[in-house]
Amino acid sequence: MLSTEMFCSFVANASGGSHSFAEAFFVSRRSDGSIEYLGSGVTWLLLAMSVGAIGMMIYMFLANRKPSVVPSVLIEEIEKRIKKKDFRSIVELTSEDQTYLGKILHAAFREAKFGFPAMMRALEQTADELATARLRRIEMLNVVGQVSPMIGLFGTVYGMILAFGAIVASGGSADPVALAGGIGTALTTTFWGLVVAIPALSGYAVLRNKIDELTVEATIVAEDVLNHFRPRKTAPTKTNGVAQSELPKEVLETTAT
């Protein structure tokens, strides 16, 4: 079993003797202390991917907050206008709103002239399209999480090639110092590959569940709103004795083209 002194000596040799332990996580070196550019390049590529993934997660969490998907202010305002039977202003309100809920409601109102079933179909279709678009934006996190371990594995394989190359060059009895550079490169790139993949995949899973939850909630709220616009039965006509259904007049007038 290696003692602490032996481990520190191994790390010092792996980094050229005069370099810090922390530096070994960012710069790969050969046994003679010179920089191993390919191994270091893999490490810095993974570092850049890590920074990009963190920035993307922060942006996506802010873009998929509840106020931008199911804004309570919009819901309260619609409920107030429904109580007042002010259907025209509801249509105008949703046309100006850029949230997920506002967009799917406005898409439904645009189809009012074709009847209530057409409004429901438009709502469901637009909801699916917008939800898919939101999920597509976070797919890059999944890609980063899947690719980064492969990049780390590339560095691992390259580091082991260096280590076995040192064994071959020494005729089968390589000095541990000669092996340290290759092994250090292999372990460092594996480490950074996991550092990138774990947060990226975790953030992707959390964001995907959050988007699913909020978009479903918004769709349910939108359907409840549309139920207030459900066609009402009119009295039977004298010509055919059949009751007719029609949307509120304000909706038809506002959405007519």
Image (cartoon, rainbow, N blue to C red):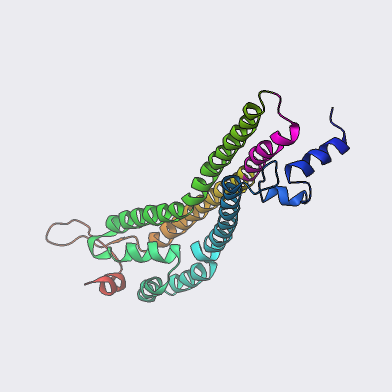
> What x and y, as percent, mark residue 231?
30, 61
At horizontal 30% and vertical 70% (from top left) the residue drawn is 251
Over which residues does the magenta segment extend? 173-192
179 in the magenta segment? yes
Near-viewer residue (106 or 175): 175
Near-viewer residue (182 or 147): 182
In this view of the protein, can residue 228 be seen by the observer? Answer: no
Near-viewer residue (130 or 46): 46
Taken as a whole, is the magenta stretch helix, strand or loop? helix
- Does 161 sit above or below residue 102? above
- Does 86 sit above or below residue 227? below
The quadrant in which residue 8 appears is top right
Q: Residue furthest top?
A: 172
At horizontal 66% and vertical 24% (from top left) the residue drawn is 171
In this view of the protein, can residue 173 be seen by the observer? Answer: yes
Question: Is 51 on the left-hand or right-hand side of 250?
Answer: right
Question: Is 96 on the left-hand or right-hand side of 257?
Answer: right
248 in the magenta segment? no
